[in-house]
Image (tube, helix red, strand yellow):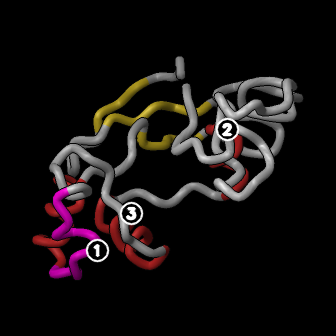
Amino acid sequence: MTGEMISWEKNGSEMVLIPSQITTSSFYMDKYEVTNAQYEKFMKATGSREPEYWQNDHFNRPNQPVIGVDWNDAMAYAEWAGKRLPTEVEWEYAARGGLKNKDYPWGNEKPDGSQCNFADKNASVDWADMMYCQS
């Protein structure tokens, strides 16, 4: 991402300006996912519940993204931080990293399993059980 960067004072997240396009105005979006450390500040300030997996050592390191939150939790966090969740159009636009008129975030080439995981281990392709997308 090459947009203007800012640091959000309340929770310390870095944000990048996503430029406007025909279907959406410009907007700010966090550059990284909300971390457990950031979410913990929110829980302490608001008395919100611990998300699922909060006590799981595989998922609860301070700089890991918080997981196990639902839409209501995400909305409450965004409201507390003085932000908002992106719309679907904004999310899709930002995920493409500025690419226009392409079928996929990486271009028009069909996925081969190295770009993303869109099939589980029961699919009939040899890379179906990959765990994550590569960037």
Residue 92: image x %, image y %?
Answer: 69, 45
- Element marked by disc 1: loop
Q: Secondary structure at mark 2?
A: loop
* Residue 24 in picture, x, y percent from top left: 73, 45
Q: Is residue 66 above or below residue 11?
A: below
- Quadrant location of residue 135? top right
Q: Main secondary structure of the magenta part?
A: loop
Q: Residues within 10 Å of mark 2 (few under 14, many from 20)?
A: some
Q: CA distance from mark 3 to mark 2?
A: 36 Å
Which of the two discs, 1 and 3, labels the residue nearer the N terminus?
Answer: 1
Mark 1 vs mark 3, foreground winner is 1
Amino acid on which the number 2 mark rests in the picture? Trp
The label number, if any, that marks residue 127 in the structure image = 2
The residue mark sitting in front, 1 or 2, is 2
Image quadrant in which you'd find residue 81: bottom left
Per the image, the residue denoted by label 3 is: 78
| Distance from Cα at disc 1 to Cα at disc 2 | 32 Å
Q: Pick whichever, 128 or 24, lies toward us.
A: 128
Residue topped by disc 1: 51
* Residue 129: x %, y % from top left: 60, 47
Q: Which residues are magenta?
A: 47-57
Marks 1 and 3 sit apart, C-alpha to C-alpha, by: 15 Å
Q: What residue is rendered at 29% in x and 41% in y? A: 13
